[in-house]
């Protein structure tokens, strides 16, 4: 099976990214052919700091490697290093109805957030994402729930293209984690944890002291019991999900463990688990920060390997469309 996923270089990684996407990647790279892409071309569709951008992209690559992406097992590269991504995006744009793009939730959200810079790139964002995926004849796309709509659109674009020009692309499948596909905000547990709301986010690189503070301040629900019930007790249910995923203990086990304890004890224990789980990532990242040349080499090598696959697909797509 070929696996492809992308992640934006801007904003700090939070435990939602880790549990929704990265953790699946780590499992998949052990048995499947994985391609991971740092999508810098997607990131520039909203206002960004172009002077610092290269550095930001490199640092993000370091974070993924620190999380455990292994360049011996997976291809990891920067999107703009493989020009076929933009080329195929143009071709796919000619079969994608604008009505479909108008319906995209992420476009609507970002248009609200960045009222003064709603550009054509932001509108076409999902077409570039479809290009990322289809270029590699991908079987599986492991992402969090919020990306489901984009993957569905990718499938629809591929089907339209194949119908019109003959079979060219594999139809990829969405892969959501069984648990953790939508980690909720620590402050407002009915909303998704999102890097746009800083205080409600637990970042992978938060210091132990900050982790403890954020968890102790996390919103809990009425009542005192530690029970999983996302409708009635969204706060504690979200924390139980996080606890379970980081500790490997089932929710049932955790409910039992904290049967006669209060929220305070539970949170203290959760903070401990998080500090212990995230410490190796922080340590590895520190180490890698001093090895820029090596990281750049990994990314260039990754791009070369990706390009071999991408150029074969684009050749076929162009050919099938009647282009030279
Ligand atoms: P983004 O930070 O939006 O580039 O997302 C990177 C990856 O993390 C995507 O696969 C998202 O679906 C996933 N993701 C983002 N936020 C969450 C969340 N709160 N819970 C689970 N997965 C998430
Ligand atoms: N849009 C995705 C996000 O915001 C990132 C992304 C870009 C992606 N291209 C992709 C994810 C291809 C999976 C496959 O998280």
Image (cartoon, rainbow, N blue to C red):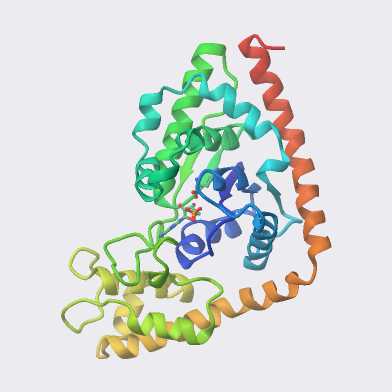
Image coordinates of residue 135 in percent, x first then y, are 63, 32
Give whichever of 146, 170 is nearer the camera: 146
| Any part of residue 230 in sight | yes
Q: In this view, does 49 lie above or below 313?
A: below
Residue placed at 75% from the left, 52% from the top?
299
Give whichever of 215, 98 is nearer the camera: 98
140 left or right, relative to 233:
right
Q: In which quadrant of the rendered view does residue 278 lie? A: bottom right
Image coordinates of residue 45 in percent, x first then y, are 52, 43
Residue placed at 54% from the left, 61% from the top?
23
Q: Is residue 312 above or below residue 324?
A: below
What residue occupies the far front of the structure in this picture? Answer: 116
Residue placed at 25% from the left, 68% from the top?
234
Q: Quadrant of the C terminus?
A: top right
Image coordinates of residue 30 in percent, x first then y, are 65, 56
251 left or right, relative to 283:
left
Q: In which quadrant of the rendered view does residue 83 lie? A: top right
Residue placed at 47% from the left, 76% from the top?
247
How many marks are shown on the rendered structure? 0
| Any part of residue 169 in sight | no
Q: Quadrant of the N terminus?
A: top right
Q: Is residue 37 above or below residue 18?
A: above
Give whichever of 293, 69 is nearer the camera: 293
323 left or right, relative to 240:
right
Image coordinates of residue 273 in percent, x first then y, are 48, 82
């Amino acid at each position: 099976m070929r696996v492809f996923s992308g992640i934006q270089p801007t904003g700090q990684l939070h435990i939602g990214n880790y549990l929704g996407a990265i953790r699946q990647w780590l499992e998949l790279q052990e048995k499947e052919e994985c391609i991971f892409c740092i999508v810098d071309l997607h990131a520039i569709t909203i206002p960004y700091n172009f002077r610092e951008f290269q550095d930001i992209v490199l640092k993000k690559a370091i974070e993924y490697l620190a999380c455990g992406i292994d360049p011996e097992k997976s291809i990891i590269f920067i999107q703009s290093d493989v020009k076929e991504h933009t080329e195929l995006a143009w071709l796919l744009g000619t079969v994608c109805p604008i009505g479909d793009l108008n319906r995209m939730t992420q476009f609507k959200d970002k248009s609200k957030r960045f009222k003064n810079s709603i550009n054509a790139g932001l509108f076409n964002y999902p077409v570039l994402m479809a290009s990322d995926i289809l270029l590699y004849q991908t079987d599986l796309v492991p992402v969090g729930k919020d990306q489901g709509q984009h993957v569905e659109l990718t499938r629809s674009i591929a089907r339209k293209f194949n119908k019109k020009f003959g079979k060219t692309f594999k139809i990829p499948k969405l892969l959501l984690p069984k648990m953790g596909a939508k980690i909720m905000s620590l402050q407002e547990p009915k909303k998704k944890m999102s890097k746009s709301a800083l205080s409600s986010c637990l970042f992978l690189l938060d210091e132990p002291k900050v982790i403890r503070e954020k968890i102790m301040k996390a919103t809990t629900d009425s009542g005192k019991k530690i029970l999983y019930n996302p409708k009635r007790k969204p706060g504690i249910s979200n924390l139980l999900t996080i606890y379970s995923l980081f500790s490997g203990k089932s929710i049932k086990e955790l409910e039992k463990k904290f049967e006669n304890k209060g929220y305070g004890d539970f949170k203290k224990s959760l903070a401990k688990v998080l500090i212990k789980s995230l410490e190796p990532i922080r340590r590895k990242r520190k180490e890698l920060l001093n090895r820029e040349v090596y990281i750049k080499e990994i990314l260039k090598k990754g791009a070369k390997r990706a390009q071999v696959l991408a150029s074969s697909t684009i050749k076929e797509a162009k050919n099938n469309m009647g282009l030279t």
